[in-house]
Image (tube, rainbow, N blue to C red):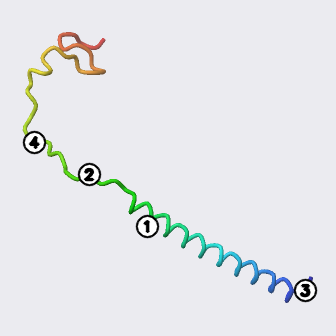
Amino acid sequence: MSVQDELTAVKRCLDDLTRTVNRLEQSLQREDASRAQSVHRPEHLVSIPDTPYDSTLWTDSDDEGLGARDRHAP
C-alpha cells in the first residue's frame, strides 16, 4: 500500500468517525430532551422547619459506635 492510499484510508476512517460522533451527539440530545420532558416534578414542596428537635427524643439513646454514655472505652 502506498503512502497516498494509507492517507486516503485514514481520511475515510476519520470521516466515518466524525459522522458517528455527530449521530451519537444528536441521539444523546434527543434522549436528554425526552428525559427532561418526562421528569416528574412535584407540584408542591414540603418545608422542613429549622427549629431544633426536642432533646428528650434522645434521652435513653446510646451514641452509635461510641457506646453507652456512662461507660468508657478500654
Label 1 – label 4 distance at C-alpha: 36 Å
Give the residue drawn at x 14%, y 45%: 47
Mark 1 and mark 4 lie on one chain; the one further toward the N terminus is 1
Label 3 – label 4 distance at C-alpha: 75 Å
In the rendered image, which quarter is residue 60 located in? top left
Circle 4: element type: loop
Q: Which residue is mark 2?
A: 42
Q: Which residue is mark 4?
A: 50
Mark 3 and mark 4 lie on one chain; the one further toward the N terminus is 3
| Residue occupying the far bottom of the picture | 4
Label 2 – label 4 distance at C-alpha: 22 Å
Query: Cβ–Cβ below 8 Å for labels 2 and 1?
Result: no
Q: Residues within 10 Å of mark 1 (few under 14, many from 20)?
A: few
Q: Residues within 10 Å of mark 3 (few under 14, many from 20)?
A: few
Q: Which residue is mark 3?
A: 2
The percent position of residue 73, horizontal first and vertical second, equals: 28, 14
Question: Disc 1 residue type?
Answer: Ala
> Looking at the image, is mark 3 or mark 1 nearer the viewer?
1
The percent position of residue 40, horizontal first and vertical second, equals: 34, 53
Q: Is residue 38 above or below residue 73?
A: below
Label 3 – label 1 distance at C-alpha: 47 Å
